[in-house]
Amino acid sequence: MKNKKFILILIAILLTISAFGCRPQERPEGRRNPGDGDIPPIPEEISQGEGKEPRLKVYLVENQGIKEMNFEEYVEGVLAGEMHNDWPEEALAAQAILARTFVMEFVTSKGGSKYEGAHVSTDIEEAQAWDAAKINDRIKEAVQRTRGMVALHEDEYIKAWFHAHAGGKTATAKEGLAFEEEEPPYIQVVESPDSAEAPPEDTNWRAEFTKDKIKQAVSESGQQVADFSAIEVVETGPSGRATKLQIGEATVNAASFRVALDSTKMKSTQLKNISVEGNKVIMEGVGYGHGVGLSQWGAYQMAKDGKSASEIITYYFKNVRVVNLWD
């Protein structure tokens, strides 16, 4: 009798364990289950429902008006505006994933554009370039192949920074962008295989400025300089880029100074030489852009070497994963 009672109790215990062991885990509210981590929700401002393609209200600078469009239509225009439309497929695909990620992070963190009523704009000072006229079949194919795909670090959209040419090595956000917040954990300094096919003026550049132009750029930092006979790099970052410049009595942040001066002429803060000759300042350096995140000419070469879009992204961004938000 005792044995029978023991067996019944044992069976009851086993059934209870089995029931709990088979119960599916609940997913966090508003998130899909990607299998290896959480996926952040699509921002409410643009969401059309879980797993569905969002819609965007885009302020078109060229038209000075807002156009509502499907998310992927916007990505096509960005890809055409930010990368040559005849580049290797995997480079285009990587850029498409970053373009999509950029907007998701932008709307999540900022809530929308500085242009009233818009989620994002084609103003390159705010967001990404956009050029519908350059959309071709290669652009459409890259966007379609990566439809809904974004890059995440843990369960957050990354700041999908990119630039033209890393000059052989990428930068931290603090040195390349004068980023004032905590350094994102996915941003890293890596050797960049920038293609030898890049324009010579992007690989090695030289620019001339007047002293007055230099003084004007310094004044934007809230400082004034009467005169100077030299410009010196007094601090560098992990990638070797200049982070502080001494100009007369003024010490300026190099990344901010580059933007104030003219970032299309002072193409990077990876400076090789600065000379002052009379009223003329001559700068020489390598690479084009802030150097943070993905190098487009690096992506070009990696694609040529047979790397996939995901491999390109995970090379430039540390501990990120590419996931799909909608079909």
Image: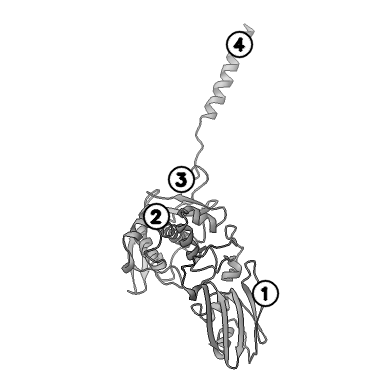
The type of residue carrying mark 2 is Ser
At label 3, counting other C-alpha atoms closer than 10 Å, the crowd grade (few under 14, some 14-19, many 20 or more) is: some
At label 2, counting other C-alpha atoms closer than 10 Å, the crowd grade (few under 14, some 14-19, many 20 or more) is: some
Residue 39 location, x and y as percent? 49, 49
User: Is residue 181 shown to the viewer in this render?
Assistant: yes
The residue at 59%/73% (across/down) is 270
Residue 95 location, x and y as percent? 44, 60
Decide which of 285, 161 is in the foreground and name it.
285
- Where disc 3 sits, the SS reads loop
What quarter of the picture does the N terminus occupy? top right
**Which of marks 1 and 4 precedes in the sequence?**
4
Task: Give the alpha-carbon distance from disc 4 to disc 3, as whole Å.
Answer: 45 Å
**Which of marks 2 and 4 precedes in the sequence?**
4
**Which of marks 3 and 1 precedes in the sequence?**
3
The residue at 48%/44% (across/down) is 34
Residue sticking out furthest to the front = 196
- Res. 235 mark: 1
Q: Nearer the viewer, mark 4 or mark 3?
A: 3
Task: Give the alpha-carbon distance from disc 1 to disc 3, as whole Å.
Answer: 45 Å
Callout 1–callout 2 Cβ contact below 8 Å: no
Callout 2–callout 3 Cβ contact below 8 Å: no
Decide which of 272, 155 is in the foreground and name it.
272
Q: Nearer the viewer, mark 2 or mark 3?
A: 3
At label 4, counting other C-alpha atoms closer than 10 Å, the crowd grade (few under 14, some 14-19, many 20 or more) is: few
- Res. 32 mark: 3
Residue 88 location, x and y as percent? 41, 60
- Where disc 1 sits, the SS reads strand
The type of residue carrying mark 1 is Glu
- Where disc 2 sits, the SS reads loop
Location of mark 4 (residue): 5
Location of mark 2 (residue): 47
Task: Give the alpha-carbon distance from disc 2 to disc 3, as whole Å.
Answer: 14 Å
